[in-house]
Amino acid sequence: MRILVLGAGALGGYFGGRLQQAGAEVAFLVRPRRREQLARDGLVIESPFGNARLPVRSLAAGEARPGWDLILLTCKAYDLDDAIAAIRPAIGPGTAILPVLNGLSHIDTLRREFGAGAVLGGLAKIQATLTPDGVVRQLNDWRWLTFGELDGAMSPRVEALAALAARAEGMVATAVPDILQRLWEKLTHLGTSAIGTVLLRANTGEIARSPGGVGFMHRVLERNAAIAAANGHPMPDAFLAEFRALFADPRGGYATSMLRDLEAGGRIEADHILGFLLRAAREAGVPHEIHEAAFLHAKAYEQRREAGRLPRG
Ligand SMILES: NC(=O)C1=CN([C@@H]2O[C@H](COP(=O)(O)OP(=O)(O)OC[C@H]3O[C@@H](n4cnc5c(N)ncnc54)[C@H](OP(=O)(O)O)[C@@H]3O)[C@@H](O)[C@H]2O)C=CC1
Ligand SMILES: CC(C)(CO)C(=O)C(=O)O
């Protein structure tokens, strides 16, 4: 399988590297700084499932041509427009696009840009980061990639990707017939984790050990579940039980990529995740004062960041 990975950050580097190790023909479509790092050091992965330093093929914008079975789209939401422009020349009639971004609204954007048939649904449950010196670091044993056709078909292309990924170390990839439901579950999970960890600037264990922390997280979880239900995607009881337990665990050390980015002074997907959920809560008539506070907090952070007034760490 020929796979073009847009971005060699935390998710692109991790899953792209693992798929290359499994035998796929992989190239990374990257920007100049990352290209230099990859040429100099290779793709460096540090992971509980085995470290790797892989020689990889990289392409710059403008060098990509059609001929790919799959484009794995791994940018942050705020880079989506640039990423769309970068992959456009690489898309041929048989190319599938698999985005693994958090959130939902990028799916409609991609379908509008490339046609509904080209776009798969995908999500990643992983904790990983790209260090400033270019190391892709997996932070725990989460390694799940879930994907499927948006119309629910188990097509040859999703089965082929699942078969390839089954040979990869350090990842578990599953093709599912209900990817939209899974995307709403991921948004409910991530949205709750992001609202809690970003607003309170703490991981889930620290929140759970604080007075009222468990009740707060459960309230956000219930509200996000109500938003999903209002959009036709009720959360299964087992899902709610799993995440109630996770948010109640005082020993948890679980944080979000949004908190990591914010603490590093980086850009965050405030509009794509928190803004989307706030709008959806309003539309669904779900109480939304916590969503409002989280979104406002993130937007005020963006103001401060743009003004160069973040505390030096
Ligand atoms: N990290 C995590 O643990 C998880 C992240 N997610 C989600 O996955 C998505 C990706 O996150 P993550 O991997 O952490 O992000 P990263 O910032 O680590 O990686 C994104 C990469 O995309 C590259 N990129 C963006 N635009 C372009 C472009 N036009 N051309 C080439 N490269 C481009 C960036 O390049 P450059 O370095 O040049 O800026 C960057 O290296 C997000 O939506 C996130 O919310 C989901 C689950 C877990
Ligand atoms: C749900 C979670 C926290 C882990 O996959 C995530 O998506 C993120 O950190 O962005």
Image (cartoon, helix red, strand yellow):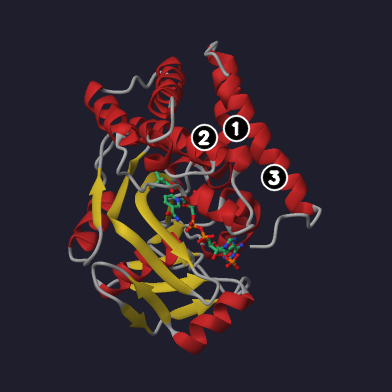
Kind of residue sitting beneath label 2:
Ile
**Residue found at the far top of this picture:** 285
Q: Is disc 3 in contact with disc 1, using a CB cutoff of under 8 Å? A: no
Residue hosting label 3: 301
| Residue sitting at x 30%, y 69% | 47
Residue hosting label 2: 195
**Most foreground residue, 309 or 90:** 309
Q: Indicate yes or no: mark 1 CB to ligand 2 under 8 Å.
A: no
Query: For this view, does 15 lie left or right of residue 201?
Result: left
Label 1's element?
helix
| Residue sitting at x 34%, y 19% | 234
Please provide percent x and percent y for residue 43: 42, 78
| Residue sitting at x 63%, y 25% | 292
Q: Is disc 1 in contact with disc 2, using a CB cutoff of under 8 Å? A: yes
Label 3's element?
helix
**Most foreground residue, 151 or 20:** 20
Query: For this view, does 164 lie left or right of residue 185?
Result: left
The quarter of the displayed image where residue 214 is located: top left
Please provide percent x and percent y for residue 291: 57, 26
Residue hosting label 1: 294
When the figure is inspected, residue 251 is found, relative to residue 60, above or below; the finding is above
Count up the numbered dots: 3
